[in-house]
Each structure stands twice: as C-alpha cells, then as structure tokens.
Image: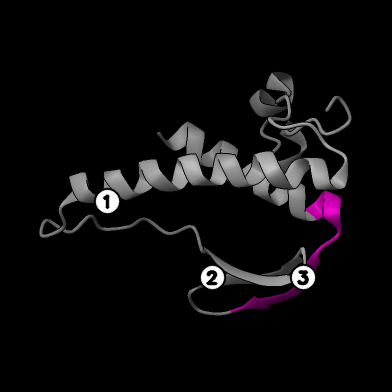
C-alpha cells in the first residue's frame, strides 16, 4: 500500500511541476503547506515533517483502509484526466534506477511519457 501511495504523491508533484501551477509555499510547525492553481481551482495540501508517529490503539484502521482505497482510485482517475491537459501520458513510467539511487521526484520519467 505504501508503494502505491508514494507513487501517487510523486505523480501529483510531477504534475504540479510540469503544469507550473505551484503558487505558494509556507513552512509551519505541522509541516510544509503548498498551494497550486489547478485548472483555475486553488488546491492546498500539507506535507508533514518526517517524525516517527505513534499509532493509537483506539482507531479502527479497517475503516481508514476503506477510505484509502477510495482515494487511491479517485486520484488515479483524476490524474488520468489531468495529465493529458499538460501534454503527458498517464501513468508515467518510473525510472527504477533512479528510485534505487534515492531520487524522489526524478523517478517519474515525464520525458518518456
């Protein structure tokens, strides 16, 4: 599951870079806030700082997994519609050699798409 989530994050970041839609960035205690204008709509998201997280016992992770599955499918559909708007093919190929070398965003090979 985490590999698919990482891939979706990379695909979103690659789209924002390729479409040149990033508008604002703000650093706070919670993490990095980003804002991009995607087809005229402001989209804001936060990337938390990398700290170890405590997993609470009172959370039903099965329900959260259901939402995760929905959002994974929804994001793939949204990317399928967004990528052609900037002249890219979805899904973009990933460069496994760059991934093994530790590159993050450079793994998404937009030149081959």
Mark linked to residue 40: 3
Residue 99: x and y, percent? 66, 28
- Residue extending furthest toward the top: 97
Residue 53: x and y, percent? 32, 57
Which-is-in-front pick, marks 1 and 2? 1
Q: Nearer the viewer, residue 21 or 29?
A: 21
Q: Residues within 10 Å of mark 3 (few under 14, many from 20)?
A: few
Sooner in the amino-acid sequence: mark 1 or mark 3: 3
Circles 1 and 2: CB atoms closer than 8 Å: no
Which-is-in-front pick, marks 1 and 3? 3
At horizontal 57% and vertical 39% (from top left) the residue drawn is 76
Mark pair 3, 2: CA separation? 25 Å
Mark pair 1, 3: CA separation? 31 Å
| Image height of 16 relative to 37, above or below | above
At horizontal 39% and vertical 45% (from top left) the residue drawn is 70
At horizontal 77% and vertical 63% (from top left) the residue drawn is 39
Residue occupied by mark 2? 31
Residue occupied by mark 1? 64
At horizontal 65% and vertical 43% (from top left) the residue drawn is 79
Q: Which residues are magenta?
A: 17-27
**21 drawn magenta:** yes
Residue 22: x and y, percent? 78, 66
- Tally of marks: 3
């Amino acid at each position: 599951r985490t590999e698919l989530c990482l891939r979706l994050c990379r695909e979103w970041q690659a789209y924002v870079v390729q479409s040149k839609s990033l508008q604002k960035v703000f650093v706070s205690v919670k993490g990095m806030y980003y804002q991009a204008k995607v087809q005229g709509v402001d989209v804001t998201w936060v990337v938390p700082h990398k700290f170890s997280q405590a997993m609470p016992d009172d959370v039903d992770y099965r329900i959260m997994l259901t939402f995760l599955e929905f959002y994974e499918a929804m994001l793939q559909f949204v990317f399928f519609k967004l990528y052609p708007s900037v002249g890219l093919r979805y899904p973009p190929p990933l460069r496994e050699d760059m991934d093994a070398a530790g590159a993050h965003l450079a793994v998404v090979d937009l030149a081959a798409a």
